[in-house]
Image: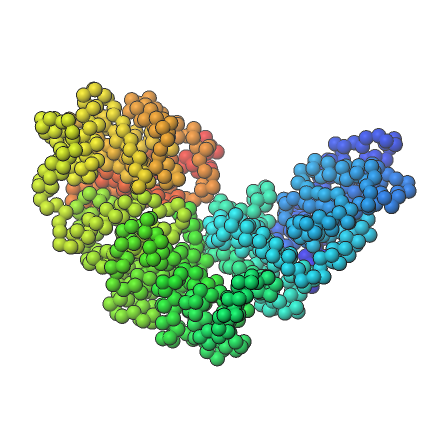
Amino acid sequence: MAKPYDQIADRRAIVRRRALEDALARLVEDLPTGAEPPRTAVLSLLREALAAGRAEIRRRFEEPGPLRNDGEQVLAATSFLMDQLIRVIFDFADQHIYPAANPSTAERLGVVATGGYGRGELAPLSDIDLLFLRPYKQTPRGEQIVEFMLYLLWDLGLKVGHATRTVEESLRYAERDQTIRTALLEARYVWGDRDLYDELKRGFTQTFLNGDGRDFVEAKLAERDQRHHRMGDSRYVVEPNVKEGKGGLRDLHLLFWIAEYLYRVSEPGELVAKGVLTREEARHFERAERFFTTVRCHIHYLTGRADDRLSFELQREIAARLGYQDRPGSRGVERFTKHYYLHAKTVGDLTRIFVAALEDSRRRKPKLAALWQTLRPRQLEGFRLDGERLGVATPDAFAKDPVAILRLFHVAQENDLDIHPATLRLVTQNIRLVDRLRADSEANRLFMEMMTSRNDPETTLRRLNEAGVFGRFIPDFGRVVAQTQHDMYHTYTVDEHTIRAIGILARIENGTLKEDHPLASGIVHKILSRPVLYLAVLLHDIAKGRGGDHSILGAEVAMQLGPRLGLTAAETETVAWLVRYHLAMSATAFQRDLMDPKTIETFAALIQSPERLRLLLVLTVCDIRAVGPNVWNGWKAALLRQLYYATEQVLSGGTLSGGRAERIKQIQVEIGSRLAGWTDAEKEEHFARGYAPYWLSFDPDTLARQAELVRRAERDHQPLAFEHRIDGERSVTEITIYTLDTHGLFARLAGAMAISGATIVDAKIFTLANGMALDTFWIQDLEGKPFDGPQRLARLAARVELSLSNRLDIQRELDSQRASWPKRDEVFTVEPRVLVDNNASDTFTVIEVNGRDRPGFLHVVTRALTRLNLKITSAHITTYGERAVDVFYVKDLFGLKIVNQEKLKQVADSVERAIRTFDARFDPVAKAAE
């Protein structure tokens, strides 16, 4: 089969070497001997040829035609263009700049391409790697030619990796350095002395390609492991590196290097004849390489540099260029990234099949492992034991007993064994047999035992998924394999997120995460049905990507799947309920005022039983923890604990109020005991300042600290009192501000905090009887950690003071900082939405605002609320990647709920209009007009 390099269409349209050589020759034909060539004119001709060639290659790739989106042809054509330019430059130097009438054998010089360029697969803007081969001793003329060529190539803007060596030196370096050996494995003759190149290839074959290749294989596998670790060790990252990432092009190259080294093949199809890959596996190899190569070419062209990261801002554009269009319930960019991850998974499958087989046959087995192998039985529950790997005795084992496919993974899990790569390959080849197992009671029992096992269910489920068994056995799960969500909140694909969530649940159960999740670790053992909890975690996102509410659709899936997996009708109903309301606890904890009795009463009415509360708490923790590495924090943990304990009290027959006046009186007694040095008169004076809701909104310790702050401020006649307290356990910094209550106070404070780089996650706003505002904010830095550091806190305090005295232009300050904000997330848009709810609280109107999270967003929203003459009493700020969900508890100027329907509509419309005006400032068209 011909390689793409041999099939380049209309080569002369890319570059006309003869014409370029003649043009260069004319520049120097009248120059006297020894005169300097007209370097500017030479460079101009070469630049024009390089630019024209690149433009033609790109035109073929991007415009309609047979070569559109053909990345392999781009790589081949770019290699050809570089070959021709290097040949022209070499001949120009050899014949016109440093001519020799009768060159000696010592003056021979060969030019060899290595690396990707050597394969004839040079990406549009990648480096070129050259090896200049010289005889045993280099002459001054040879050195001059190499130097002349390199300087011209550099002046053309090319990045050139280069070495000048003899054949003997090249082989000696390759002996010591596996990277050099790999580069020589792909060496290709470009120009100059062909005999030197042939000598190199003969020497390389004789030196390295006659043994078993064990050292090369081991070195390449070690390089792969280090690279995967460096790139995050997951193929499911949101901005994958197409070349270096797990499951990317470099992993395909690794397979082929080893195949070329061991089997002397020149393309994947030849591995079929060698019995290494099946014909279908070879097609998968070629299809994945073609897809990744095309994506990589688009990245180079769109960024204008040798970048291999498939960033957020590129994903949507490349998806459109590859023909992925939006459909009802399905975005084109998400289907594109799904196909990306499926190809990456295919590469993982091929790597496992191919490389693990090599590991098995070529890696030295440690002596202890060999001894252990002799002590273990050769048969284990009907499977063959080969060292530490489980396999089947005969190729038709699965055809005879399809349930053995699931039993294989079950036995491996129970005995801490790997599965032999040849057996995994056999599973893949017999994957259609899994369809028969869905109605098999034994198969369903085995699956549930694996998922609920106390022996690392995460690894087993990931194995089942990698082998394709998981999605085949549970087709609803198969629909979310490699399913992505194009946003900045979800780090993993849906299947990977689900498997990680089950792993987190297992670690909560075994106590590994007790320090991180003390509440969940304590109550998980009180849960009556482990299968209910595990199945709810498995199914909570099962219906994502279907176009409707995934919670409702997922509950329907649970009702169908529960009986099949052996759950009773009552257990199935509980699983369906958990899936239906799996977001309820986090939404209530993060977006509602937990000190408002109506919040707890409404949530308790939904939950109805302590068992459901325990189940939902653990499910919520697992879900949030599995979203990504920086999503969970102490603040969220504290809110969930607060909601859990308050709801548990109601469900256990207690009350939240217990007599409001009595509770306030009890709280004030507790506060008084903490106010050392206060007279009774001072205490009574302070208690008279606060209205009833204030005393019910904080714990006694916080109220006592605030009392001390107010006392100092009043005693010293401070117009502004500012105090901070870092709460490491909850990952927040608590800011308390005591100042004169003025219209728009919250908006000004929010603006000062945005300018200072602080993110508000919660706020409580109170006006005391003396007309002073006592406002508490819980803030974090942009990484979700406490906003700390003496300098940062001092700047924040200074900006708060400036904003309250109207000496801070908040909008101008935010605009001046815009250049330093992250650019990677500008691609995302969030449609503004304002929801007004008069049922969530008995005494407040609750306004939920959804929009694109940016510094200054909260300031814009609160300023709009201020202009509507609304008074904010508490604010609850949540971000999901690029999406902000801010909830405000408000009253009108008379301290009442807003009940007039026209006023409610005006509120929603005005806030939405303010957000749209704010968003327009970031629109490229709007910015261009400024």
Quadrant of res 790: top left
Residue at position x 23%, y 38% from top? Answer: 874
Q: Nearer the viewer, residue 728 or 73?
A: 728
x and y percent of residue 78 in the render?
A: 67, 48
In the figure, is residue 62 to the left or right of 854?
Answer: right
Count of numbered badges drawn on the protein: 0
x and y percent of residue 480 in the render?
A: 42, 60
Residue at position x 75%, y 58% from top? Answer: 206
Residue at position x 36%, y 51% from top? Answer: 625
Quarter of the image containing the N terminus? bottom right
Quadrant of res 267: bottom right
Quarter of the image containing the C terminus? top left
Residue at position x 48%, y 70% from top? Answer: 376
In the figure, is residue 883 to the left or right of 357?
Answer: left
Q: Residue furthest top?
A: 717
Vertical side of 451 occupied by 48: above or below: above
Q: Residue furthest right?
A: 102
Query: Is residue 916 something that shows in the picture?
Result: no
Query: Is residue 563 something that shows in the picture?
Result: yes
x and y percent of residue 286 in the render?
A: 60, 61
Q: How is the image coloured?
A: rainbow
Quadrant of res 144: top right
In the figure, is residue 53 to the left or right of 926?
Answer: right
x and y percent of residue 269 in the render?
A: 65, 65
